[in-house]
Amino acid sequence: MENKKIATPLITSSTRPDKQSKNRGSSVLKLGSVIVLIIALAISALGNLYPNTNVITLTKFNEHIAVAELQHTLAASGYSVQSISQSGGADMVVQLNSPSLSAPAASLLRKTYPLGEVKVTKQATTPLWMQRLAIAPIDLGLDLGGGVLFVLQVDTQKALENRVDSVFEQVNSLRIEKRLRGVSVHKEQGGVIIRAQGAYKDNAAALIDELKTLFPDISANQETNSALYQQRLFYTNQQQQQFAKADMEQALSTLRQRIEELGITEAIVQRQGEFGIRIELPGVQDPSEAKRIIGATASLSFHGLSDIGGKRVVSEDGGAINIDIKAIFTGNDITGAQAGRDEMGQPMVQLQLSSFGGEKINRFSRTHIGQPMATLYSEYVTDARGDVQMQERVISVAKINEALGTRFSITGLGSWQRAQDLALILRAGSLEAPIKIIKEQTITPTLGAQNITNGFQALLLGLSITLGFMLLWYRRLGVVANLALAINLVCLLGLMSLLPGVVLTLPGIAGLVLTIGMAVDTNVIIFERVKDEIRLGRTRLQALQRGYKQAMSSIIDANLTTFICALVLIGIGYGPVKGFAITLALGIMTSVFSGVIVSSYLSSWLFKATKEVGHA
């Protein structure tokens, strides 16, 4: 009877089996989700077994180049060719047996074949099924994959001086054009002074009124008496600060666009200090092309010719012509630019204007058919004393035969390389403020490979010591910790490969080493709690359950504070500091995942499989 009384509630209970079934189903679903996540990250990590390689691409050649000729040219200079493939007629892809020599080999081909485009690009080596799934290796930073570092200085003061020069030129041009007697214009540091004798002050006042319309941001300071009328035009300190801020933002935006035009997708462009810009170009082995484009300050403007006043500018043939101070339109009105060749095979740049720019050129050309229009090329150059000066020259003077629209072309550029560079700069935008490269550092792929070897040797050494310690100290639970640690590394590599913009650097490898310690620390906290529970008389299963549950608050507190610090470093750091912070932040996420969730399943499985956890 006693057995029946005890058994009856167990048999008649209808809620407990349902609840157990639901819990079991939920547990299976959670376990399945964990397994699927681990498998997905492991597949993503597989891409790191197939690093990208460097190849040389030859494009946009007018004449066909024979494969045998190309191979002979490279072999004569000591470059061993692995393969040469052709696509699209004259386009070729050259792969060397030593990909690290691609940059000097490309330089040789540029000199040998100057009429085309020769570049060093990356080529994936992953299997086709991985490429279809967009699986790729982790992008390497400068110190691991090689590349170029530039630190630029933006001269905002020079940009301000050029603004003042522009005001002076337009004021003087208006004075001559309107034939204002008794009015003189002078330039001084930071401003323009307009003077007139008392009898001609009305002429000066009329000039001032027109200038305020042309330059609404400029300030005027009037100093008059009975004999002299004088006004000083200048920009206030607040306006100068606004100009400097705008010049820095414009420089950052323009440089990012130029680098995108070069096809460098993993570049880092960020502000460094008040007037500095740091540019990292991982994987770039030929810095000459990047340096030529990054440091270029060229801009275009289009002007009518002037007989009265205007500005005298040197032309390409060494002479000089007078052009109107005010441009018909500038590079800011250009929305597209492509290098091409005209009917004679000469390089040219085809331009596409915005609707507003098209209206400008259409309005001017309709009223000036049969008259010439000059193309003014301006750029900042450094003289022998190291000073930056604006250099201007007219690169072409063309006769307007008909009303122009939003599309037309520029010829007379001389070389194909110059046409390409000009088209790229026009697409990306010109720089208002001159820039100077104050630091340039090139890291070769050989040095990067050595850094990778040294870094991963340190990682393996730390991993081996950690694995050995956990096995000796925790026995079978040490096996759980080591399996969780291996899963943690696989998940971390998979996550870094999966997320866009994540770059592995040498400090990032240090972050991997630190992640090992943090992941093991999570298991140490749990296992020590398990030992405490066993001392209190709990069973092995109860000790495991309570140990994981009670350790969670300590684990979350410790990792959350470190994660916040990593986010701060990601926000304010750059270069190696940012690479370390990114790896650390991702490592915290994967270590908590593997140290808590994965190891809890492994511990439970081990206990059920052996019926004994061993020494805790």
Image (cartoon, rainbow, N blue to C red):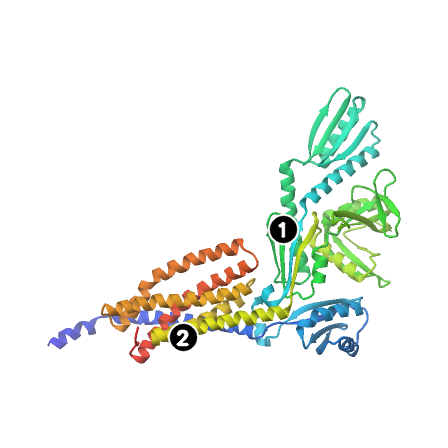
Residue at left offset 37%, top offset 68%: 523
Q: Judging from the image, what secondary structure is the residue with disc 2 in? A: helix
Q: Which numbered mark, 1 or 2, is in the foreground of this view?
A: 2
Q: Position of residue 323 (x, y in %)?
A: 84, 43
Where residue 130 sits, quadrant-wise, is bottom right
Q: Is residue 570 above or below residue 114?
A: above
State the residue lying farthest toward the left. 1
Q: Which mark is residue 276?
A: 1
Q: Quadrant of the C terminus?
A: bottom left
Q: Judging from the image, what secondary structure is the residue with disc 1 in? A: strand
Number of numbered discs? 2
- Residue 569 in view: yes
- Residue 18 in view: no
Q: Position of residue 463 (x, y in %)?
A: 45, 72
Residue at left offset 48%, top offset 73%: 460
Q: Position of residue 534 (x, y in %)?
A: 26, 70
User: Which residue, given by chain and number where applicable, does mark 2 sit on?
Assistant: 468
**In the visual, does 489 lie left or right of 416?**
left
Nearer to the camera, 558 or 401: 558
Mark 1 and mark 2: span between their CA atoms? Answer: 48 Å
Residue at left offset 69%, top offset 47%: 433
Mark 2 neighbour class, 10 Å CA radius: few under 14, some 14 to 19, many 20 or more? few
